[in-house]
Image (cartoon, rainbow, N blue to C red):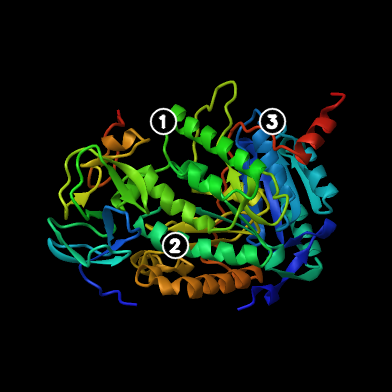
Amino acid sequence: MDFQTVTWQAYARAGGRKGIRNKVLIIYTVECASFVAKEISRRLNHPDVDVIGFSGCTDNDYAIRLLISMIRHPNIGGVLAVGLGCEYVQPEKLADIAWQEGKCADWLFIQNEGGTRKAVEKGTAYAEAMLRQLQSTPRVSMGFSELVVGAECGGSDYTSGLAGNTVVGAFYDLLVRAGGTAIFEEIVEAVGLLDLLEKRAADEPARRQIAATYKKAMQYCRDVRQYSISPGNFVGGLTTIEEKSMGAVVKSGSSPIQGVLKVGERPRSSGLWLLDSTPDPHWMQFGITNPNDNEGLMDLISCGAHLVFLVTGRGNVVGSAVAPVIKVTGNHQTFVRMSEDMDFDASEMLWSSQRLEPLAERLALLTADVCGGQQTNAEKLGHKEYFIPYKYQDKPAGTCKERWEQKNVGI
Amino acid sequence: MNREQKQTAFQIHPSDNVATALGALEAGRVTITGEACAPEILAAEPISDGHKIALKDIEAGMPIVKYGVPIGTATVNIAAGSWVHLHCMRSNYDERSAHLDLMTGVPVDSEYE
């Protein structure tokens, strides 16, 4: 099948980017504003209204970069920023960025509006107006060559490495051949596999980036004494992080790795990219970390992934704000037991490797349907999780960093 | 495709010294599929779905090999046909996994007080 000819109707954004959803994003800028933000969303009760936010009162460069990347995400057409009024993160600045991106934008401070009821009423009216305006977003044809996808695993068992991740990896190869962009993360689940990753580097700078990222991730795991393996993984037959890692890296397929992205950084070209979501050492070294599956999904979406795959063995139910999540399992029992949550059964791989190509093609067709508007099971159930922690990461290299430095000249 | 394939384990790489149980195994004959070096092995004990069976005798201190790469080290002598998990092998990186409950994986080193 020629996947270069597969297209769907997308949403045109200013600057030529294309989104596969047309959402209003409500952002709270401190935990104290989260109730009002969620209440606005509850009143609207609309599938295209998502809420995210940052809970800390003191701001954090990493968290702000993550919020901005969501504002700029092509699936987002409008942004409403809701603040309390005393916090460090400024809703007005977030709304400004949305304006600059050519999106609908508004903001409010709950203190200025006169409390909960008035802020909810005003915010609801703002968001309703945005939803009306988004109805006239121009539609445009989109194909795999313009698509960015992300993948990570959660609740892995022995089938993840044999079936679920294997099929996603084969789809990644197919997507890259069609000119698309694929991102994989979880360098902390590549323990013992540096040689294998280095051999797949597209060029020498990419190899150096991969080696440095791996080295940092291993230091991080040692320092924080956290390896990315959970009680459920052990019950599912995985004994060590090395074993889980081999199964996890399979989901990247076999394409050359173009380089390493930081959270919130867009790929500089099409092809396969590794996302480094591990904290960088800072004044508290790595600090206390709280990684989870939704953080991983957010990180992939922050790099511009239109949709993300979550590969599970034991079963996971989460979705995400901003981008659809397609849940793939290689465990047939899990697929049957949690059929309302699982989108794709890759278990046939366990019985015959001849099934790899047909399964990858079937996953590609499902992906095209979801890009064209078909709801994933997580979307049907209303899953819109998000997770934005305090974290330190060095600013992305290259143009983003230069822009950042230019912006800060004269401060 | 045959989901009823009983007593089967999957060997991923020819150099592996463990295979993965495709379904719960009872003690007795087990068919090896995938990159099998031998057509079958005798399971010495029951092995849960997705868990590993030793394909040959593995001495303490020797690597456990799956996907053609070492995934840890044997902590005791492991006889061919045995169940291979936390009780007889350890990670070369992660020390904590040695402190987890063998059957449930639940940490026994966290205090709830």
Quarter of the image with the N terminus of chain A is bottom right
Q: CA distance from mark 1 to mark 2?
A: 28 Å
Question: Which numbered disc, 3 or 2, marks the residue that appears first in the sequence?
Answer: 3
In percent of width and height, residue A236 lies at: 31, 53
Q: Chain of mark 1?
A: A
Asked which quadrant contains residue B92, the reply is: top left
Q: Are marks 1 and 3 on the same chain?
A: yes
- Amino acid beneath label 1: Arg
* Residue sitting at x 63%, y 60%: A45
- Amino acid beneath label 2: Gly
- Amino acid beneath label 3: Glu
| Disc ID at residue A225 | 1
Q: Chain of mark 3?
A: A
Question: Which numbered disc, 1 or 3, marks the residue that appears first in the sequence?
Answer: 3
In the visual, does A256 lie left or right of B111? right
Name the foreground residue: A46 vs A364: A364
| Few, some or many residues within 10 Å of mark 2 (<14, 14–19, 20+) | many
Asked whether the beta carbons under mark 3 and mark 2 sit within 8 Å of each other, the answer is no
